[in-house]
Image (spheres, helix red, strand yellow):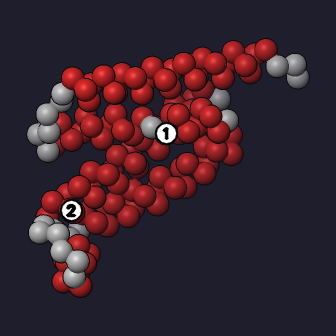
Amino acid sequence: MKKFFFIGFGVLMTFDTLAQICFKYTANNALPFEMSTDWIIRLFLHPWIYGSIIGYIGTYFTWLTLLKRLSIGASFAASHMEVVSVMLVSVWIFDEPLTLPKLAGAILILAGIMCLAFAEEKLAHSKPV
């Protein structure tokens, strides 16, 4: 079950990160933003939008697969690992600054996920079968 958890959330995080990074590439290349048909056409002419769509579809189906086997609490918490991965990839690809508040937020997200994982494991071992 742990192998399924790590592989599943690795796939979920990959799809989710792909979607977010592709969406940012699309948004950056479709500037300036304007509420017009031309802008929407410009969005869909950019190839990164399709990476974003693929990422969102992959995220959706991976998430549903994980929910079939894992508890909703652990699944929901671990799905927020994508916030950390997008932040780190954005530092690398978009030269965004890695500030102390971002780093503190990432650490709090990881700590929350670990606390929930330990609590879920402890609860699973204490329940009578």
Residue at the farthest right position = 129
Which residue occupies 24% across, 39% down? 89
Is residue 23 shown left or right of residue 95? Answer: right
Q: Quadrant of residue 123?
A: top right
Task: Identify the disc placed on residue 79.
Answer: 1
Between 23 and 18, the residue placed more toward the observer is 23
Q: Where's residue 70, x and y in %?
A: 66, 36
Task: Identify the disc placed on residue 27.
Answer: 2
Q: Amino acid at mark 1?
A: Ser
Proximity of marks 1 and 2: CB atoms separated by less than 8 Å: no
Is there any visible trace of residue 80 in the rendered image?
A: yes
Residue at the farthest bottom position = 37
Is residue 28 shown left or right of residue 126? Answer: left
- Tell me: residue 21, above or below residue 78: below
Assign a secondary structure to mark 1. Answer: loop
Assign a secondary structure to mark 2. Answer: helix
10 Å crowding of disc 2: few (<14), some (14-19), many (20+): some
Q: Where's residue 125, x and y in %?
A: 75, 16
Q: Amino acid at mark 2?
A: Ala
